[in-house]
Amino acid sequence: MRHSLLSMFFLPLLHLPFSVLQAKKLPCFQQVIHDVFRGGDLIIGGFFPLYSVEANIFTGLEHPQKACNHFQWMHKNYQQVLALVFAVENINQDLNLLPNITLGYQLFNTYHSDEKTLESSLRWLTGQSQAIPNYSCWGQDKSPAVIGGATSPLAVQMGSLLELYKFPQMTYGPFDPILSDKIQFPSLYQMTPRDSFLSGGIVQLLLHFGWTWVGLVSTDDMRGEKFLWDITKKMSSNNICVAFIEKIPVSERRHEESQVAFMPRIMESSARVIIIHGDADSLMSLRHSQPLFLTTLKLWIITSDWDVTLRPHPFGSHAFHGALVFKHQTSEVPGFSHFLKSVNSAKYPGDVFLKSFWHSAFKCSNENLEEGECSPNASLEDLPLEYFDMAMSDLSYYIYNSVYAVARALHEMFLIRTEMGFGGDGESFTLLPWQVHSSLRNLQFNNSAGEEIVLNEQRNTEAKYDIMNYLVYYQKPELLVKVGQFIPKTLLEHDFTISRNSIEWGNSQIPPKSVCSESCSPGFKKIVQEGVPICCYNCAQCPEGEISDQKDMDHCIKCPEDQYPNKDRDHCFPRTVTFLSFKEPLGLALTCIALSFSFLTVLILGIFVKFQNTPIVKANNRILSYVLLVSLTLCFLCSILFIGYPTSARCLLQQTVFGIVFTVAVSSILAKTVTVVLAFKATRPGSKMKRWMQPRVSGFVVFICSMIQLALCGTWLGTSPPFPGLDTHSESDQIIIICEMGSVITFYSILGYMGFLALGSFTVAFLARNLPDTFNEAKFITFSMLIFCSVWMSFIPAYQNPKGKAVVTIEIFCILASSAGLLGCIFIPKCYVILLRPERNTLERLRQKADSGRC
C-alpha cells in the first residue's frame, strides 16, 4: 500500500523519457554524471553538491554544446566525496571494525532543485540509473544508511522520501533545530554541533571593533529566522543597531534575480559591515552578484555554513577580500592529508566524478578529455584554494564521522547477531534499514582524532569556532588565515580572542568604521533622535559643571564636590580651597581702606576733643559726636572681620558686631537730628520743649535703639547663628569658605531695623533742613542719611546674585561706603571750620550769623 501511494505521488513528478535518464550517452557525458558506484557487502549512499547544470535539460539534449556550457563544477565540494572514500577504505582495512564485511558506496550529485534531488533519491532506491518508483534491483538488506544533506532544504527533500522506507539519514550540513523534531524526522541524524552561541560570538566581534551599524543577510526559512531573532536580540542588548535585513528566498536561487532584488540595497546602505548567515546553496548568489569595483566598500562577516572560497565566476572572490569567517573548529584526522596527496585520476579509474573533476580543475583540453588522459603527474595540492583545500573542511569532517557512526552501529549489530549464533560473514549479514536505528540512537564513540561523537541530539555539543581572515590577491592563491577564536563554555562564559594586527582589511590598514553616527568625543553626550535607531544620534556638549570622560556616553556626570570640570568638560580636577584673604590684592586693599578710614575717624575724634570748648563743637552735642565717632571707628574696623579665614568665632562676630555698632551710629545720628529739632522748638517763647533738651534724653534714645538691636542679635545667636560653610557653586575651580547666615530672616531683620532708624533720621533731618540755626546739622544729616540709605538699598538686590567672595566684598564695600558717607557729610565740614576757618568758630561770629538769620 505504501509503495502504491509513493507511485501515485512521485511518478508524475519524475515522468521523464528514458533517453533523458540515459544522459551518459550524450557528448557531454563526462560532465553530466548520474552516480558513481563501488561494490561491497553493504552499500552506503552519498549525496553531495558537486556540480550544477543551469540550462534546461531538454534544451541540453537538443543542443548538447549549450548544455555543456551551462555546466558548473563546485570543485571544493569534491573533498566531501574523498572524505567518504577515505573513511570507507580505512574501515575496510580495520580488522577490528566490521570484520569479514566490506563497505561500498554509491555517490550521487544533489542538484539545487526539489525535482532533481528527489530524482537522485529515487535512483538510489531503485539501484539503477533509471529512477523507477516502487522498484529496486538490489535488496534493501544491502543499504544500511544514506549520508547527505549539505543544506537543510536538501535534507528535508531527501528525508521526505527516504523516511517512507525508514532509511537512516546522516546529515552533515549546518545544525537546524527543525530537523531535530523526531516526530517529523525520526530517521534523521544531525552530525553537526549546535550553533546556539554563534550570535554571541559575532556580537563580541562587533563590540571589539566598535561596529554598531550592521546589515544582516540570511535565508528566508525557519533556521534563518531563528538566527535573526537571536542576533538582533543580542545586538539590541549591546546597543548595536540593524541597518537592514535582507532575506534570500530558499526556493529562488537564480543569481540574476538576487542581483536585481537585494544586492543594490546592500551596496547602497551606509553600513560597512554585513553579516552573512545561510547555507552554501542560497548564499552562492552573493558571490555571483557582488560587483568587483565595490570590493573595498564592505566587510563581510560570514558563518561557517558557507565556504567563501567557492568561486562561481572568475572575479567573485575579490569582492570578499578581508572577510572574517566563523569556521567550526575540527580536529585533524590522521592520514587524511596524506590520502589527498595520493589521489589522482589514475588511482580510481572507475570514478567518473573524479575524472570529470580532474579535467575541470586542471583545465584539460577537449582532446585530452576524449582520450581520458589529463595531467597524470598532477596532485590535488597543486590546485589553488579556490579549487581545492588540502585542509579538511568541517563538512568533510562531519561526513567522515557519519561514515564511522554507521560503521560502528553496524558493528554493534554484527556482534549481537554473532552472539546469537547468526553468520559472521558479509553474505549472511542481512538487515532492514529500520533495524539500524536501535544502534544509532544512543551511539557514542571517539573518532580517530580523539574527539567524542554523540548522536543523541539532546546531548549534542556546542560548536567551537576559529575566526579566519579570507585573503585573495591578484594572480595569487587565496588564503584563510586564523586570526582568533571563539569557544563557548557556558551561557555566561566565553573565550573570545582576536589578533587585530594579523587582520588585513581589504585595501585599508585600519578596521573600517560601521556606525550610523560618528562617536561623541569626551565632553559630549549622545542625544537620541525620536523615531530612529538608538545608534543614530546627535552630540551635545555637557552642561556646565558636568563631564563625560568616555566616548558615546548617554549622560554626563557631575564632578565630586571637591573637584571641578576642565574647559573641555572631559576631566575633573581638584578644587583649590580659598577665601577672602589678607594676602590677596582685594583683601589687602580693603584692609588698607578700612584702617585708613579708622585712622581718619580717630584723628577727627582727637580734633573734636582738642577743640571741645569751641562753639562749633559745643553747638553739636559733644557727647553724641564722640559716640558717633567711636561707633564709626568700630564700623570701619568691623569690616576687617569679613577678611581672613572664616572661623566659628569670626562668623559669630561679623554680623553681630556690624549690626550693633551701625545701630549705635545711626541711633546717634537720630538723636542728633531730634536734638536739632527740639533746639529750634525750645527757642520759641513759652515752649515746653526745654525739658527735653537735657543730654540724658539723647543718650536714652541711643540706648533704647541699641538695646533693641542687641536683642535681635541675641535672638539670632540663640536660635540659628552664623557658621562656617563651603560654597561649591560660585566658582567652578574653587571651594570658597564663607560664613553661612544661619537664619536669613534674622539677618534681614537686623538690616531692616537699621534701615528703619536710618529712614527715620533721614525723614526728620529732611524736614528740619531749613531751620535757621547757626550750626544747623539737618542738611548734613540729610545728605549723610541719603548716602547711607542709597548704599544699603542697593546692597539688598546686589547681595542676591553674586556668590562666594563677591558677597563678602559687596558687604565690606557697603560698610565702608556708608560709614565714609556719615563721616564725610557730618564731620568733614566741621573740621574744615575748626582747622582752616577758625575765625568762624567764635561767639561773635555766631551772634552775627544768628542776627542775620533772624532778619
Image (spheres, rainbow, N blue to C red):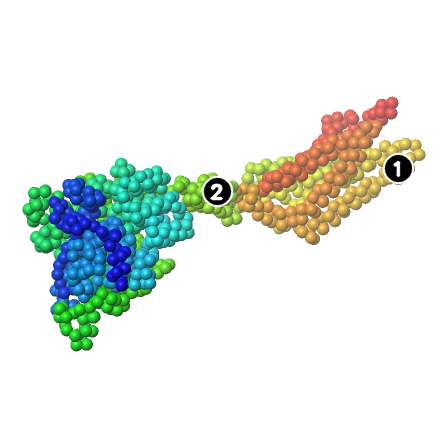
Toward which corner of the image does residue 598 lie, by quadrant? top right
Q: Pointer 2: residues within 10 angstroms few (<14), some, or many (20+)?
A: few
Rendering coords of residue 854 (x, y %)? 87, 25
Which image quadrant for residue 190?
A: bottom left
Label of residue 151 in the image: none
Q: Is residue 198 visible?
A: yes
Badge 1 is on which residue?
689
Residue pictured at 23% horizontal, 43% vertical: 317
Give above or below for 745 relative to 41.
above
| Residue sitting at x 35%, y 53% | 222
Is 357 on the left-hand or right-hand side of 840? left
* Residue at the image position 68 percent from the left and 40 percent from the top: 635
Marker disc for residue 530:
2
Of 25 and 345, the residue lying toward us: 25
Query: What SS does tag 1 mark?
Result: helix
Give left or right: position of 326 versus 760: left
Marks 1 and 2 sit apart, C-alpha to C-alpha, by 84 Å
Residue 678 image-quadrant placement: top right
Q: Residues within 10 Å of mark 1 (few under 14, many from 20)?
A: some
